[in-house]
Image (cartoon, rainbow, N blue to C red):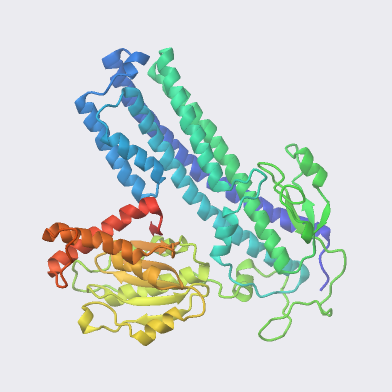
Amino acid sequence: MARQNSAYWQKRMEALEDKQYQNGAEYYKDVQKQFREASNNVQVDIERWYQRLADNNNLSYAGAKKLLKKDELDEFHWSVEQYIKAGEENAVDQRWLKELENASARHHISYLEAMKLQTQQHAELLSTEFEGGMTEFLHKSYGDQYYHTAFEIAKGTGLGSNMAQIDSRTIDTLIKKPWAQDGKNFSDRIWTNKDKLVNNLHTELTQSIIRGADLKQAIDNLAKTMEVSKAQAGRLIMTESAAISAAAQKDCFKDLAVERYEILATLDSHTSDICQEMDGKVFEMKDYEVGTTAPPFHPNCRSTTIPYFDDEFTKDEERAARDEDTGKTHYVLADMKYEEWEKQAVVNSMPQDQEIKITKKMNQNAYSVDRQVVNSKEYHDKYEQLNIGKNTAEQAYVKAKDMLEFADGTQMEYTCVLDARTGNEVFYSKGVNKAMANKVAITKEQYDGIISHDGEIILMHNHPSSGRPSGQDIMTVFRVPNAKGSLVAGHDGVVYYISDVNRNVDIDKIYKKHYDKHVREILNIADTAPIPEKIGKDVMNQCKIKATTDLYTENQKKKYFKIRRL
C-alpha cells in the first residue's frame, strides 16, 4: 500500500488540530462557569460589606478604614474559618491559608481589609480549581492527540504498530516543563494571573470607595476586572492545549520513526504573519523546537504539524512495521474505526466501561456498601481522574468493586496490589488473620514479593467506615519503596488516593512524635519520662486519631505527600 500524498496528511492532521481546538473551547466553557460563580460570590460579599459600610460610615474612605464592631468581627472570623476548612480540602496554597489564619487571630480588622480578604478568598479557590482542572485536561489532551496521530499514520501508510500505554508520569513531567522562552509552565501562569487578578480587584475596590462610587458601579467595575482575568484564562487554555498537543504529536512522530515534518497553518483572516510564513515549511525531527520550528508560535496559535514523506512506501519494503510478538506485518484497513485500532494496537488498552454491580444484601448496617453510588457511572469515572494510566485505572476500578462486594456489610478490610504500568494483579488477599481482627493477612514472603516486584505498584484496600486514610495507611506508602500510590475505597463510594510521597522524609518518626505527644497529654506524663510499654486500647485509639490529624495538618505546610478525595 502506497503512502498517502501531502494533501491526505493535511486533511487528516487539520482535522485533528480542529478537534483539539474544539476540545479546548469546550473546556473553556466549564472554566467560564467557574469564573461566573466566583464573580457572583465576589459581588455578594461586596454588596453585603458595601451596604454595611454605607449604613455605618457614609461610604467614605476614612470610614472604610474604621475597625469592625465586635459582632461584625465575630462574623468575619467565622466565615474565614469556614473558608480555611474548604481551602484545606481543596489544597489551596498554604501560604494564603496561613495569612488567613493570622487574620482570624487578629482582634482589629477594618472594613476595607475584610472586603479585600474575602475577595481574595474567591480568587485563591478559583485558581486552585483551575489548576487542578487544567492538569487533568492537559493529561487527556496529550493522550488523545498521541493515539489519534498514531492512528492516522497507521491508516495513511496502511501499516500498523503496537503502541505502548502512555505512562502518566511522562505526561506529568512534560506539562510541568516550561516550553516558552519566559521559563514558565501553565501552573506558573495561572498563579501569576491570580496575583494580577487579586491586585486589580483590590485596587478597583479601593478606588471605588475613594471615588464614592455607588454599589452598582463598584460591582460593575469588579465584574469587568473578572472578565479580563477570564479572557486571560481562555488564552492560557488554548495556548497550553496547542503546546501539549504539539508535544504529543512530536513524541508520536519519533516513536513511529517519522524523520521529517511539515508545518500546516490554519489559513484564514485571523492567521498571523508568522504562521503564514511558516506554512508548508519542512524540517528534520532533530530540528524540532517549539516557537521556532514548531507550533505554537504565539498565543492562540492554530498551526500544527504533519508527517512529511517524499517517497513511496509499499508493503513489500523492509521498513514495514512488524508485530514484536509474532514477527508478522499487520495492515490497517482504510475504513477501520479508531476504537477498533486502539483495541488492536495499544498494548494494555483500557477495556470498555465494565458493568460491575454490587449485589444487594438483605441485612443493612453501618458498614453496608452504598450501592446506588458505587454502581453508578460517576463512581467508575472517579478512577479515570487518578492519572495512573487508562488500563491501570480500569483495573483499579474492577478490584475496588470486587473488594466492596466481599466486604459489604462487614468490617473486613481487603488488600490488593496492582502493577502501576499494566494494571496486572501482583497480590490480592482476602484471607483473615485472627490475631489482626478484620485485617488482611500478609505473610513475610508475600510482602517480600510485593516490594521486589519489577516496577512500580499501586496499593489498594477498602475502608468499611469510609474514613480518610489513617496514619498507618500513609506510613505504608512510604515504607513500600516501589509504591507509586495508595488507593482507599470507602463503602459509601468515597475514593482517596495518596501519591507523590517524599521518601527523603522519615514519616514514621514524624507520626510517632505526634502520637507520643498525645499519649503524654492524656496520661499526664512529663516530656522527659518514658512512654509506658502497655497503654489502654481506648487511649491508644484516641492518640492514633489525633496523631493522624496532626500529620494531615503538618502535611498541608510541609508537602510530605499528596492526597486526593474523589
Residue at coordinates 31% horizontally, 75% vertically from top-left?
405
Q: Give the x, y percent position of residue 296.
A: 70, 47
The quarter of the displayed image where residue 537 is located: bottom left
Q: On the image, which quarter does residue 431 sit in?
A: bottom left
Q: Count of labels shown?
A: 0
Q: Is residue 94 left or right of residue 288?
A: left
- The answer to whether residue 357 of the structure is visible from this angle is no
Q: Name the residue furthest right.
A: 311
Q: Which of the pair 267/429 is nearer the observer?
A: 429
Residue displayed at 38% across by 67% down: 487
Say whether residue 378 is left or right of residue 517.
right
- Which residue is depicted at the point 67% across and 70% down? 336
- The residue depicted at 29 percent of the width and 79 percent of the height is 440
Q: Nearer the viewer, residue 42 or 443?
A: 443
Q: Position of residue 138 (x, y in %)?
A: 56, 54
The quadrant of the rendering that contains the N terminus is bottom right
Q: Give percent across and percent down for residue 523.
A: 12, 61
On screen, residue 457 above or below 18 = below
